[in-house]
Image (cartoon, grey):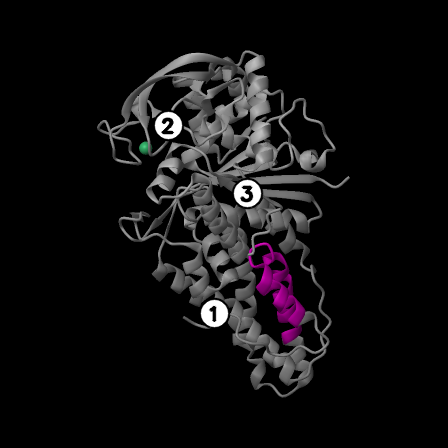
């Protein structure tokens, strides 16, 4: 039986069109999915959109659209962006899909029947931007640090989820890495949150939000957006909301997720409410959560008001698909914050792609073509390189994996610069130099496939063809 690999991105909230933050998570998930497929694992890669809630209702009203119509438009933008970026997701789940809605109703009903959801009252400070009640200590000078507005005092009848009931069990599971939180500093952060603040019951329904899934036993409430959204990780595999999970039904063999990727702002809910829901539903927890950092744009927070938002379409237009994927994945240590900007992207594009990979491929193929050399090349011949690469990929060290590959390319570059085979006459001598160079290129691009699928495939075809000739420039200089 092949190993199974199930990877998810969050469902992205449709209050905004896709930007580089969503793109980072999604390309990283795609790199992992492609890599796990390439080593023979049965892989399922899920992404999608989160479409309910007061904020979406408000936004749609502002545009004089039905919420569903508005959500349709934004969901399409996400789908289009991922198509353009060559994202290989196996499903795209929308939380307005009828099957998802039915499953959420069933799941909530079974949590209610179990006594884990009860009618209560909630009082608190509510930030509309976050769609979350805020603790006093989360505020900065009384304002939501993300939205810079004072949250409103609200009190309402709601159904609460007994999150507190699962505190001890969850903390144990997280400490023992049964639910692994990566990188380690994020795990420590969560453990300390459990130990110092603890888990309080959370509101699982809203009375004044029409744009949501009705609570099945009390239609005057709708399901709180988080509770609705989390279940996508199950419904995206075809789960119908009934527990215990019946295996063998479609994609459910993939449960639980091997790893769930996300940015740090949604870690806390993913390390508390989400796994507690699974415990309540008697379902296995995800094996791991991996949290990546944020990108700043030239030292500043990315924001619409600063006009510095980078959309995936802008990147593709300037650099092309594969180069965009490379630039994003090499921009920061995965798991840490990074700083990007057009100037930095241009520089890296020219150095690593135009002058680096592109130039080396052109020099080597042109020499081989001109001298009509017949080479015997093999894919996968550098076992040492494969081993090192594999270790880095398993540790989510994407930028280091890329650096490793670029060091290998540099070796070949230096070989050519030192030996200057274009000045030689003797074909045998030229071949002795160029054959290992071509072999090295082939080894590298084969491992580069998860990051740059099209360009890698193109180079592999070029170097495994009967007659190797110089092709078009892969990365025209900017
Ligand atoms: Zn806020």
In magenta stretch: residue 460 = yes
* Real-space CA distance between mark 3 and mark 1, rounded to the nearest whole angstrom: 32 Å
- Tell me: residue 456, above or below residue 301: below
Residue 74 in picture, x, y percent from top left: 45, 47
Residue 25 visible in the current orientation: yes
Q: Is residue 376 left or right of residue 442?
A: right
* Range drawn in magenta: 434-462
Residue 156 in picture, x, y percent from top left: 36, 17
The residue at which mark 2 appears reads as 132
Q: Residue at horizontal 58%, vertical 35%?
A: 98
The first of marks 3 and 1 along the sequence is 3
The first of marks 3 and 2 along the sequence is 3
Residue furthest toward the bottom? Answer: 425
* Number of numbered discs visible in the structure rendering: 3
Residue 175 in picture, x, y percent from top left: 53, 23
The residue at which mark 1 appears reads as 354
Q: Secondary structure at mark 3?
A: strand
The residue at which mark 3 appears reads as 47
Q: Is mark 2 within 8 Å of ligand 1?
A: yes
The first of marks 2 and 1 along the sequence is 2
Residue 200 visible in the current orientation: no
Q: Is mark 1 within 8 Å of ligand 1?
A: no
Residue furthest toward the left? Answer: 141
């Amino acid at each position: 039986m092949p190993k199974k690999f199930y990877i998810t991105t969050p469902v992205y909230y449709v209050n905004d069109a896709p930007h580089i933050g969503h793109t980072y998570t999604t390309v990283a998930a795609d790199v992992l999915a492609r890599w796990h497929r390439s080593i023979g694992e049965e892989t399922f890669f899920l992404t999608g959109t989160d479409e309910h809630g007061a904020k979406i209702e408000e936004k749609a009203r502002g545009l004089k659209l039905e919420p569903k119509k508005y959500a349709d438009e934004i969901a399409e933008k996400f789908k289009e962006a991922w198509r353009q970026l060559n994202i290989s997701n196996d499903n795209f789940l929308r939380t307005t899909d009828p099957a998802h809605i039915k499953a959420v109703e069933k799941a909530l009903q079974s949590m209610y029947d179990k006594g884990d959801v009860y009618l209560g009252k909630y009082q608190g400070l509510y930030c509309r931007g976050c769609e979350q009640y805020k603790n006093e200590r989360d505020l900065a000078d009384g304002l939501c640090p993300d939205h810079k507005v004072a949250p409103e005092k609200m009190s309402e009848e709601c159904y609460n989820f007994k999150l507190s009931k699962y505190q001890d069990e969850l903390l144990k599971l997280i400490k023992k890495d049964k639910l692994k939180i990566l990188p380690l500093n994020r795990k420590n952060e969560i453990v300390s949150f459990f130990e110092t603040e603890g888990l309080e019951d959370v509101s699982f329904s809203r009375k004044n939000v029409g744009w949501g899934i009705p609570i099945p036993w009390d239609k005057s409430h709708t399901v709180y957006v988080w509770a609705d959204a989390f279940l996508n990780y199950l419904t995206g595999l075809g789960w119908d909301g009934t527990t215990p999970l019946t295996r063998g039904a479609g994609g459910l063999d993939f449960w639980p997720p091997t790893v769930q990727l996300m940015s740090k702002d949604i870690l806390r809910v993913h390390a508390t409410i989400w796994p507690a829901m699974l415990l309540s539903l008697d379902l296995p927890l995800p094996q791991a959560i991996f949290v990546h950092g944020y990108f700043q744009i030239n030292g500043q927070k990315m924001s619409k008001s600063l006009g510095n938002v980078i959309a995936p379409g802008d990147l593709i237009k300037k650099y092309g698909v594969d180069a965009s994927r490379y630039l994003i994945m090499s921009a920061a240590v995965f798991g840490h914050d990074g700083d990007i900007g057009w100037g930095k992207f241009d520089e890296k594009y020219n150095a690593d792609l135009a002058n680096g990979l592109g130039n080396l491929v052109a020099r080597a193929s042109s020499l081989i073509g001109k001298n009509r050399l017949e080479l015997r090349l093999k894919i996968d011949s550098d076992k040492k390189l494969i081993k090192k690469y594999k270790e880095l990929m398993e540790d989510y060290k994407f930028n280091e994996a890329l650096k490793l590959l670029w060091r290998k390319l540099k070796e070949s570059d230096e070989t050519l610069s030192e030996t200057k085979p274009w000045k030689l006459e003797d074909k045998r001598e030229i071949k002795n130099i160029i054959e290992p160079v071509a072999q090295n290129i082939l080894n590298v691009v084969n491992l580069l496939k998860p990051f740059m699928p099209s360009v890698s495939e193109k180079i592999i075809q070029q170097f495994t063809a009967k007659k190797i000739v110089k092709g078009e420039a892969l990365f025209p200089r900017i």
